[in-house]
Image (cartoon, rainbow, N blue to C red):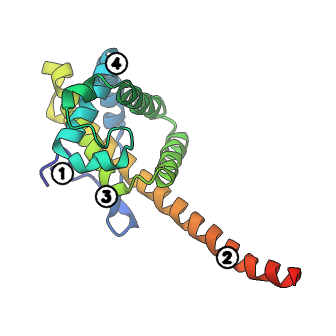
Amino acid sequence: MGCAISGLAPKQVGDVMDDVPIVHLTDEHREIIKETWKVIQENIAKVGIIMFVGLFETHPECKDVFFLFRDVEDLERLRNNKELQTHGLRIMHFIEKSVARLNQMERLDQLILDLGKSHYRYNSPPKYYMYVGAEFIRAVQPILKDNWTPEVEEAWKTLFLYITSIMKQGYVEEEKNQRTTMANTSRERPEKRLNVI
């Protein structure tokens, strides 16, 4: 609702969690993404900054996740912020790796799953993931100019829905792992105390 991704109704092949569909990337999607990435890649740093400034502009609550940017209100200062530029490049390099693995879905899935797990450790909840895809799409439309078509839009939306769904899986898996670890640790402690006495 209201974001660049919400209008797409992807092909669902099952549910991973209650609200997380598994999205199918077609061969056509993969080819379109790889072709358009060649143009986007030339503007990688620019897209990263535009994407994050747009994210903070449209969803200021997202800044709460980013300790370094939390209190920066001036969007112009954000555009020139080295840490934001670095993080924008990190996201763009993740997208680049994802595009490179489009024909190696197991490797792509693992890359995304690991990213979701790390986002749990960074305390970055899944509710924000879709916003990044929407802002990426807004940032690349002017770069692709006349090459931006409904098919290109559908392919990129589908990729971000795919990434979001697997990241959420990773987040939930890591959350469960952490809970299990904490539960096991708390169970071990009473035994250790008894042994000490």
Q: Residues within 10 Å of mark 2 (few under 14, many from 20)?
A: few
Q: Which residue is mark 4?
A: 38
Q: Which residue is rendered at x = 16% and y = 43% of the image?
A: 58
Q: Depth check: give the residue in front, 40 or 23.
A: 40
Q: In what element is the residue under mark 1?
A: loop
The nearer-to-camera label among 2 and 1 is 2
Residue 98, horizontal then vertical, whole percent:
44, 34
Residue 140 in sight here:
no
Q: CA distance from mark 3 to mark 4?
A: 28 Å
Q: Earlier in the sequence, mark 1 or mark 3?
A: 1
Residue 99, horizontal then vertical, whole percent:
42, 31
- Hey, what amino acid is under mark 1? Ser
Q: Which residue is mark 2?
A: 186
- Hey, what amino acid is under mark 4? Lys
Q: In what element is the residue under mark 4?
A: helix
Q: Earlier in the sequence, mark 2 or mark 3?
A: 3
Q: Which residue is mark 1?
A: 6
Q: Mark 4 near mark 1, Cβ–Cβ under 8 Å?
A: no
* Left/right of residue 185 with respect to residue 125 in the rendered view: right
Q: Residues within 10 Å of mark 4 (few under 14, many from 20)?
A: few
Q: Residues within 10 Å of mark 1 (few under 14, many from 20)?
A: few
Q: Which residue is mark 3?
A: 12
